[in-house]
Amino acid sequence: MILEVALIDVSPGQEEQFAAAYGKAHPILAGTEGCHSVRMTHGVESPSRFVLLVEWESIEAHEENFRNSDRFDQWRALIGPYFAKPPLVEHFNDVPA
């Protein structure tokens, strides 16, 4: 399992519009083959900052099934207009306990 973490800074004053757009965009991402879960969080101390957490079957599932598909274009068209700058996206593996 791979965890995608995307740090998203939204233009100040556009937070509610971004959240509404995310509500429309969520099914596009969540319905992607290889996507196990999707969670968007909203900053308390930094209200224009959101963090997207997506569990993927693999990096390939993220890259091939989403990023290199029409789904990504649809997703980005809905939420992209609210970005203050491009999101910082990284992938993580679990650390065994």
Image (tube, grey):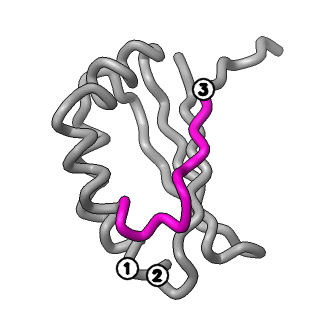
Residue identified by numbered label 1? 17
What amino acid is at disc 1? Gln
Q: Which mark is drawn over residue 47?
A: none
Circle 2: element type: loop
Circle 3: element type: strand
Q: Which residue lies furthest to the bottom in this view?
A: 13
Mark closer to the chain start, 2 or 3 = 2
Q: Estimate the x, y position of residue 21 in percent, counting from the top left.
A: 31, 68
User: Residue drawn at (20%, 49%), measured in percent from left and top?
Assistant: 74
Q: Looking at the image, is 74 positioned above or below residue 20?
A: above
What amino acid is at disc 2? Gln
Would residue 77 be found to the left or right of residue 48 on screen? left
Q: Looking at the image, is 92 positioned above or below residue 42?
A: above
User: Residue drawn at (55%, 60%), measured in percent from left and top?
Assistant: 85
Q: Which mark is drawn over residue 14?
A: 2
Q: Estimate the x, y position of residue 32 in percent, counting from the top left.
A: 25, 31
Q: For the residue carrying disc 1, how many other residues have a C-alpha within 10 Å: few (<14), some (14-19), or many (20+)? A: some
Distance between the Cα atoms at labels 1 and 2? 5 Å
Residue identified by numbered label 3? 91
Q: Residue 89: within the magenta? A: yes
Q: Give the range drawn in magenta.
A: 80-90
User: Residue drawn at (72%, 73%), measured in percent from left and top?
Assistant: 46
Q: Looking at the image, is 72 positioned above or below residue 43?
A: above
Mark closer to the chain start, 1 or 3 = 1
Q: For the residue carrying disc 2, how many other residues have a C-alpha within 10 Å: few (<14), some (14-19), or many (20+)? A: some
Please identify the quadrant where the C terminus is shown: top right
Q: Which residue lies furthest to the left in this view?
A: 70
Q: Looking at the image, is 32 positioned above or below residue 87?
A: above
Would residue 50 be found to the left or right of residue 45 on screen? left
Circle 1: element type: helix
